[in-house]
Image (cartoon, rainbow, N blue to C red):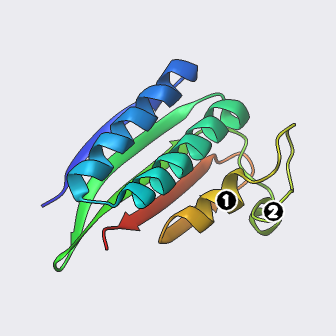
Amino acid sequence: MTTAAELPINGNNDVVLVRQHVRSAAVDVGLSLVDQTKVVTAASELARNALVYAGGGRVRVEIVHNGLRRGLRLTFSDEGPGIPDIEQALVDGWTTGGGLGLGLSGSRRLVDEFDLKSAPGEGTLITVTKWAR
C-alpha cells in the first residue's frame, strides 16, 4: 500500500507547506526525531532549489513499504532549465546561485536513497527516500 500526496512549489509559502507535510508524513512513517529532521531539511532544500532555479515545480510525498520496512519517498519535479553537469552540481560548494552550494550534495547525505535525473532544457527529477530504522 502506498499513500501519496502531490504539492505545488510556486512560492515561499509552498516551501513552508512542503516542510510541514513532510514532517507530518515522517511522523506517520515512524521516523526518529533525528531522521525526521534530516528528511525535512532535505525536502526544504530541494523545494527551494525547484523554486529558485526552475521557477517552481511539484513534489510527490509517498509513504512506501519494502517488506516490513516503511519509508518516506519524495519526488521533486520541475520544468526548469535542467542541470547541464549533474556530477559538478553534486560537488560541495558548487553553485550557480548565491548560496553555499550544499543543497543537492547536502540533501543527498541526509537521505538513504537519492536519484537525480536532469538534462539541459528538460527540467529536473529528484527522488529521495528515507527509511524508518
Residue 73 shown left or right of residue 101 in the figure: left
Question: Residue 99's x, y, as percent?
Answer: 82, 41
State left or right for residue 10 relative to residue 90. Answer: left
Residue position for label 1: 106
Q: Is residue 118 visible?
A: no
| Tag 2 residue | 92
User: On screen, 53 above or below 40?
Assistant: above
Q: Is residue 68 above or below residue 53?
A: below
Q: Secondary structure at mark 2?
A: loop
State how far apart marks 1 and 2 are (Cα).
Answer: 8 Å
The residue closer to the viewer here, 118 or 34, is: 34
Which residue occupies the extreme front position in the image?
33
Q: Amino acid at mark 1?
A: Gly
Number of labels in the image equals 2
Q: Is residue 119 left or right of residue 50?
A: right
In what quadrant of the picture does the N terminus appear? bottom left
Query: Residue sitting at 67 percent across and 35 percent down?
Result: 54
Q: Nearer the viewer, residue 17 or 10?
A: 17
Q: Residue furthest left?
A: 1
Q: Quadrant of residue 51?
A: top right
Residue 32: x, y in percent?
34, 61
Q: Residues within 10 Å of mark 1 (few under 14, many from 20)?
A: some
Residue 87 badge: none
| Contact between labelled residues 2 and 1, with CB atoms less than 8 Å apart | yes
Counting residues from the start of the chain, the first of labels 1 and 2 encountered is 2
Residue found at x 50% / y 56%: 38
